[in-house]
Image (cartoon, rainbow, N blue to C red):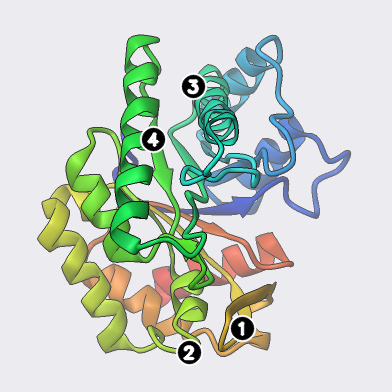
């Protein structure tokens, strides 16, 4: 599936206001709200069957709603035990397979943990796992973006520069930029125009204009301590500087998908879209 030709806004999961909250109704509700995307939440299990996927694909095409997915949380591409690493890889591969069957575009996953290991060693382990995943997907004709997400705690692998370096090394891989995670991971930094600007300058430095034309973004309000992320919040109940963040997206002419992960998913998605269109 081709990348969106503009910046679309959507919900992390089925909108709360959907009647009879299932995936098909969720897609329809996203369209009714005037949003353009929805993330399928596979966080506890891959809850869409191969039999159901074509129906979801047809609905998303009918409503012109882009689908992404969030792979299960139980992933660590730096696991010391080979069986855990391979189980993690399988969950990502299966998420990508089902998303493609649904007509979707981009898979998000949390790449893993440092486990008190040297950062260079962890980088090599994660990179090796991602290369294996991408080869298997390519061999099986699965052609969706499969993206490690910037993580919200310093104990987790996934600061944004690590992920940009991985993206340089592997085809069909770019990061999911969770700006709230980047803010929480640094215990309050990366929340100003200058810092947002620096992130996007680095995207262009590492990945060229394609990196800005093909972004999968997460944002929400966020609660954090010096140890990083604690939980998501409604934007207006947090210190997340979303107004300047949206302005920087406009200045860099970013294209792709913005998925809102606030507790009031559609309200904050609509707020971000409104600020983008009017700001």
Residue beneath disc 2: 188
Mark 3 closeness class: few <14, some 14–19, many ≥20 residues within 10 Å = many
Q: Is residue 119 left or right of residue 47?
A: left
Residue beneath disc 4: 129
Image coordinates for residue 37, horizontal then vertical, percent: 53, 45
- For marks 3 and 4, the one nearer the N-term is 3
Q: Which mark is residue 100?
A: 3
SS class, disc 3: helix
Residue in view at x 70 percent, y 9 percent: 51
Image coordinates for residue 112, horizontal then vertical, percent: 50, 51
Residue beneath disc 1: 224
Q: Residue 86 versus residue 250: which sits nearer the camera?
A: 86
Image coordinates for residue 81, horizontal then vertical, percent: 56, 38
Image coordinates for residue 95, horizontal then vertical, percent: 56, 29
Distance from Cα at disc 1 to Cα at disc 2: 8 Å
Distance from Cα at disc 2 to Cα at disc 3: 37 Å
Q: Are marks 1 and 2 in contact (CB under 8 Å)?
A: yes
Looking at the image, is mark 2 or mark 3 nearer the viewer?
2
- For marks 1 and 2, the one nearer the N-term is 2
Distance from Cα at disc 3 to Cα at disc 1: 34 Å
């Amino acid at each position: 599936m081709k990348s969106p030709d503009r910046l679309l806004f959507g919900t992390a999961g089925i909108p709360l206001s959907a009647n009879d909250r299932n995936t098909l109704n969720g897609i329809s509700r996203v369209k009714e709200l005037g949003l353009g995307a929805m993330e399928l939440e596979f966080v506890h299990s891959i809850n869409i069957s191969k039999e159901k996927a074509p129906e979801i694909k047809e609905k998303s095409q009918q409503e012109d709603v882009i689908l992404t997915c969030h792979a299960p949380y139980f992933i660590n591409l730096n696991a010391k035990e080979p069986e855990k690493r391979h189980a993690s890889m399988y969950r990502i591969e299966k998420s990508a397979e089902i998303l493609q069957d649904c007509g979707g575009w981009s898979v998000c996953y949390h790449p893993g943990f440092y486990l008190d290991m040297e950062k260079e060693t962890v980088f090599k382990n994660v990179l090796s796992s991602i290369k294996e995943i991408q080869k298997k997907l390519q061999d099986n004709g699965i052609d969706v973006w499969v993206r490690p997400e910037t993580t919200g705690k310093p104990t987790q692998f996934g600061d944004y520069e690590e992920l940009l370096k991985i993206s340089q090394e592997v085809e069909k891989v770019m990061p999911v930029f969770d700006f709230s995670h980047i803010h929480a991971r640094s215990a309050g930094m990366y929340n100003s125009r200058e810092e947002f600007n620096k992130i996007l300058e680095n995207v262009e430095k590492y990945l060229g204009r394609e990196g800005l034309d093909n972004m999968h973004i997460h944002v929400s309000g966020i609660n954090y301590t010096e140890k990083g992320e604690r939980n998501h919040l409604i934007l207006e109940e947090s210190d997340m500087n979303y107004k300047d963040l949206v302005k920087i997206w406009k200045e860099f002419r970013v294209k792709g998908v913005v998925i809102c992960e606030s507790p009031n998913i559609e309200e904050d998605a609509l707020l971000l879209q409104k600020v983008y269109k009017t700001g």
